[in-house]
Amino acid sequence: MAGRIILVTGASQGIGAATARAFADQGDRVVLAARDPATLAAAIAGFGPAATRCFASRCDVSDPGSVD
């Protein structure tokens, strides 16, 4: 089912980053959301060719103004 657009929160490290990479590796476009843009950029840089299907977005889901 490649070709979807996937949003992953907490995507700068750990399970979130692994989930985002798995979707990107199978051909989906992925929006990675997390609080620290530098950590997000580092995570995406490690995705290799799949990084071209990724977009980083600074987002703190505990802040309603950040997700509105």
Image: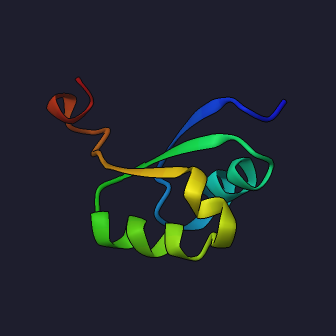
Picture quarter with the C terminus = top left
In the image, taking residue 33 as reference, residue 15 lies left or right, namely right
| Picture quadrant of residue 6 | top right
In the image, taking residue 35 as reference, residue 66 lies left or right, namely left
In the image, taking residue 27 as reference, residue 34 lies left or right, namely left
Whole-percent x and y of residue 11?
50, 55
Residue 52 drawn above or below residue 60: below
Which color scheme does this rendered protein use? Answer: rainbow
Instruction: Count the numbered circles shown.
Output: 0
What residue appears at the point 62 percent right and 52 percent down from the top-left corner?
Answer: 20
- Viewer-closest of 14 and 7: 7
What residue appears at the point 57 percent right and 44 percent down from the top-left corner?
Answer: 30
Residue 37 drawn above or below residue 58: below
Instruction: Give the farthest residue toward the left.
Output: 65
Whole-percent x and y of residue 45?
51, 74
Whole-percent x and y of residue 43?
50, 70
What residue appears at the point 29 percent right and 64 percent down from the top-left corner?
Answer: 36
Picture quarter with the N terminus = top right
Instruction: Give the farthest residue toward the top.
Output: 68
What residue appears at the point 57 percent right and 58 percent down from the top-left corner?
Answer: 52
